[in-house]
């Protein structure tokens, strides 16, 4: 199992990357000979092996808890209810770690009439969970997005302009403790024309705070951007190129990015910085338009670069000024 180890007083703790599953038997082994060899290489005196130092094997099987279900879907992104036909992905957020390997059995894309879309998602061998096991990235099959590719020609597009869909998550999906979700979840949305336009930083509008305050810096986009990438790939730096610390809030259906600074703003020149791999909902990034020829195209082929939009914070006691 993948995970990390941590030394404790008198023991070793193993932290799995994903939670243990109910009903699965696990075996932990401690190889004392490997430890003695490492100690010998470091010059530690060798000691005779006692019974307590021999190899240890420990087996454990987690039993289903008797507590009531409490894990729920807390958010699905994009949060907008109007989405482009060439939407690339959904992010599913849960309140606690989930069971891995069961996602595609419990996520459905349903048309307004009640018929389910056949195989709309790209089913990867390894599901795309975050490290905590609480956020899952679900990709729309690229072959169902671009015209001319075989899956779209044979089965049709996953999403069609002008139609209404529901993203449905079953309550039977179990969390890492083997308990079902507290309730099923549905996201209803309408599909509009495909988005083939590359986003541009020059079109972003900034509401700039005054020096000496802890007012928020607000960035407004002309279209929704990728929620997870907004948190990771956008930041503000000062004239010394140091990142401004603060709390990030993303709102208005991922059309605003707000920074609440930890310390009051100092007067001077700042820069809103972004990696050019920041994307909109259709995978068009600041570095290039999204073109789907194979799943390889979903990878970041464009050379990574940083874009900057400079702005100035002044001692102003009147209302905030907007930088275009």
Image (cartoon, rainbow, N blue to C red):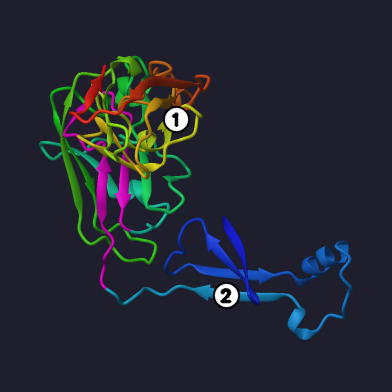
Q: Is residue 323 left or right of residue 14?
A: left
Q: Nearer the viewer, residue 163 or 113?
A: 163
Which span is picked out in magenta? Answer: 68-95
Q: Is residue 165 magenta?
A: no
Q: Nearer the viewer, residue 312 or 73?
A: 312
Question: Which residue position holds label 1?
Answer: 238
| Residue 234: quadrant of the picture | top left
At 44% across and 30% down in the image, what residue appears? 237
Q: Secondary structure at mark 1?
A: loop
At 26% across and 67% down in the image, what residue appears? 69
160 in relation to 229, above or below: above
Asked if residue 200 can be seen in this view, the reply is no
Question: Which residue position holds label 2?
Answer: 59
Asked if residue 56 can be seen in this view, the reply is yes
- x, y percent for residue 247: 34, 44
| Residue 197: quadrant of the picture | top left
């Amino acid at each position: 199992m993948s995970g990390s180890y941590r030394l404790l007083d008198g023991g070793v703790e193993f932290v799995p990357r994903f939670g243990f599953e109910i009903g699965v038997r696990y075996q932990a082994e401690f190889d004392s000979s490997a430890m003695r060899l490492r100690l010998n290489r470091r010059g530690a005196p060798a000691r005779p092996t006692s019974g307590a130092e021999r190899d240890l094997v420990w087996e454990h099987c987690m039993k289903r808890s008797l507590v009531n279900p409490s894990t729920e879907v807390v958010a699905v992104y994009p949060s907008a209810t109007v989405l482009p036909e060439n939407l690339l992905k959904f992010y599913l957020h849960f309140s606690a770690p989930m069971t891995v390997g069961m996602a595609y059995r419990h996520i459905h894309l349903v048309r307004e009439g009640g018929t389910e879309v056949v195989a709309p998602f790209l089913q990867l061998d390894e599901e795309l969970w975050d490290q905590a096991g609480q956020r899952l990235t679900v990709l729309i099959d690229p072959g169902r997005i671009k015209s001319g590719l075989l899956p779209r020609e044979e089965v049709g597009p996953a999403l069609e302009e002008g139609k209404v869909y529901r993203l449905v998550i079953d309550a039977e999906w179990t969390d890492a403790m083997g308990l079902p979700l507290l309730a099923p979840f549905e996201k209803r949305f309408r599909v509009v024309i495909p988005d083939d336009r590359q986003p541009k930083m020059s079109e972003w509008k900034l509401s700039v705070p005054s020096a000496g305050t802890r007012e928020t810096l607000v960035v407004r986009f002309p279209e929704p951007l990728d929620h997870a990438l907004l948190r990771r790939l956008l930041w503000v730096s000062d004239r010394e190129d140091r990142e401004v610390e603060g709390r990030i809030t993303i709102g208005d259906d991922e059309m605003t990015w707000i920074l609440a600074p930890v310390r009051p703003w100092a007067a001077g020149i700042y820069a809103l910085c972004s990696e050019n791999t920041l994307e909109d909902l259709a995978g068009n990034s600041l570095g290039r338009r999204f073109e789907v020829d194979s799943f390889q195209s979903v990878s970041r082929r464009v050379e990574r670069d940083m874009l900057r939009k400079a702005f100035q914070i002044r001692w102003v006691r009147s209302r905030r000024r907007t930088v275009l």
